[in-house]
Amino acid sequence: MTHIISDLPIGPTDIEAAARTVAPFAVRTPLLSPPVLNERIGTRVFLKPEMLQRTGSFKFRGAFNKLSSIPQEQRGGGVVAFSSGNHAQGVAAAAKILNMRATIVMPKDAPASKRERTKAFGAEVVLYDRHREDREQIARDIAGPRGATLVKPYDDPHVIAGQGTAGREIAEDMAGLGLAPDVVVAPASGGGLIAGVATAVKARFPRATLIVAEPEGFDDHGRSLVAGRREAHGAGGGRTICDALMALTPGEITFAINRRLLSHGVTATDEEVGAAVAFAFRELKLVVEPGGAVGLAALLAGRIDTRDKNVVIVLSGGNVDADLYAKLVA
Amino acid sequence: MTHIISDLPIGPTDIEAAARTVAPFAVRTPLLSPPVLNERIGTRVFLKPEMLQRTGSFKFRGAFNKLSSIPQEQRGGGVVAFSSGNHAQGVAAAAKILNMRATIVMPKDAPASKRERTKAFGAEVVLYDRHREDREQIARDIAGPRGATLVKPYDDPHVIAGQGTAGREIAEDMAGLGLAPDVVVAPASGGGLIAGVATAVKARFPRATLIVAEPEGFDDHGRSLVAGRREAHGAGGGRTICDALMALTPGEITFAINRRLLSHGVTATDEEVGAAVAFAFRELKLVVEPGGAVGLAALLAGRIDTRDKNVVIVLSGGNVDADLYAKLVA
């Protein structure tokens, strides 16, 4: 549809196909424009509330699209995935719908709610130590003997195209309002969501500015965009309350897309993210998890140029433990 | 439009007019149908999430419609209202937009968040003792000398018509989906919301069953529908966590409508309401206040006949103190 994206790993037609695939099961989340946010920021702000998606995050989109792409004769082996939580739930829910067996390799320190919810979707959960064990190796060891398909959390064209359906809905809804999205902000861990969203948005609105939002210290995408190649973040063994956004580097496939379509990165501190979670509770009445609120946090902290712009913020998920949530909104 | 409602205090044309009046400022809230709820209940369930409305509850609709009806020459006197919280915010926000002075008489034990938010909209707040003072008298004493207009929380045709815009949107969105709402459930304190919603829904879908949801013990509408006349609830000086739903009796005007258009009442205990608030946090990712969740609570408790029916539940608001919320979702 547009020249700039014709040689990338996925294109708008892949997202069109994904949209048809996920439509019967995924939620078409609304595009919200809360007056309280517009008035505070002084421009038109739109939210894509992916916590309203099936499983409580955008991850169902990519997982369902990927699992649907597995040939019928290979489905008997089931699927294996590694994930800190939201991808786990997305894969588990997609597998349940498609009547496939799912095993999820999760870090021992993942939020309890994410573990419990993954099990509730019928998946088997295998825990590992984030600091001492290699989750990819564990997943491969499980998948091999079974003939199971490994479902990567982001570095897979079908996963990226699935996540892109969120961007397609943004583009469609903005066009329906007669508006262009000047700025679109989405969080990134491995970069699958924003790669898909950027592909879909740029196809319809080539002049849109795509900004990746990351927790302070975990800014591997921001650094990589500056360097022009995949770089690790500098957080070392540090922590962030954004448990969903701790990937060490951008994905290979996702970065091939993101380096071409994204403008730059912004960050937010854990304190700013906590304030954004509380703002969403108090003023927006939406349950956002820390990782899902990092774009909103950057917006509220004044780190995004919003003058005379239509700004779209993707709130990517809402799976947060009740005790952490209580602390953040207090 | 339909014979059964031609002789009632308000009709569909009043709601049409209100819809035009509130459109530039009110949020057109989406109609959601979360898979997790559909699968749990075993039928198609739709939610009207009025916590996403300006001020965090449906009350802005009625307040803005009422204030807009005040003739220009009387607006200088401002407005006075009494409210436990959501009507207060609705009136305060509407007055701010229309550049009118607002004074709100609130009970001393109203949730702190509701008091603070009312002040944040620029209103003056006067506190009274719920058990020893007459809020209507206090409001009249303030309004008289100023020439202010008293804005009742429910027993006013303009307020009811404004709340009815939520019902109009439900009817429009269901029709857009090619579906009829077989059952529509909304909470009631004085009955303004459900009177407006019932008027709008019945105009388009005369066979819809309208059910009023109330906290156990505070079932004045349920009792009144059985008795055929306005009856008080039997809770005496008792409490409920549904602070928004404690009116002693249905309103006169609202009951003239509700006795004709509603089928019956259902109730939920405080425990069931708390479980519904937690369900909305965990599974729906929506912040619902206790009073706003009573219909959902009755649904989850199995008190609504849902077999082969399209069920619409109005979640009326999301203004809840963080400390109570933390307890409920723990």
Image (cartoon, coloured by chain):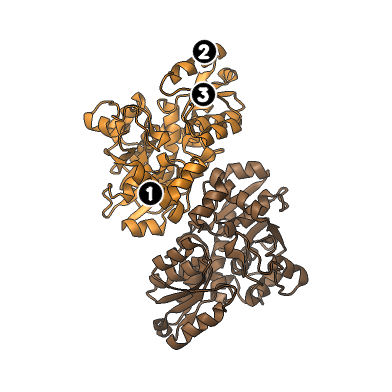
Chain colours: A orange, B brown
Q: Which chain carries label 3?
A: A
Residue B189 shows up from this direction: yes
Which mark sits nearer the N-terminus, 1 or 2?
A: 2
Report x, y in % for residue A124. 58, 25
Q: Which chain carries label 1?
A: A
Q: Disc 2 marks which amino acid?
A: Gly
Q: On the rendered structure, is B18 left or right of B7?
A: left
Report x, y in % for residue A64. 52, 31
Q: How crowded is mark 1: few (under 14 residues within 10 Å), some or many (20 or more)?
A: many
- Closer to the eye: label 2 or 3: 3
Q: Mark 2 points at which residue?
A: A144
Q: Name the residue under label 3.
A: A127
Res. A275 mark? 1
Q: Calculate the distance from the C-alpha at mark 1 to the C-alpha at mark 2.
A: 44 Å
Above or below residue B231? Residue A25 is above
Report x, y in % for residue B20. 47, 68
Q: Quadrant of residue A103?
A: top right
Residue with the most extreme left position: A227
Residue B280 shows up from this direction: no
For this rendering, which residue is in front, B327 or B182? B327
Q: On the rendered structure, is B211 left or right of A58?
A: right
Question: Are the residues under badges 1 and 3 in a single subunit?
Answer: yes
Residue drawn 22% across the image and 29% down it: A227
Q: In which quarter of the image is residue B101?
A: bottom left
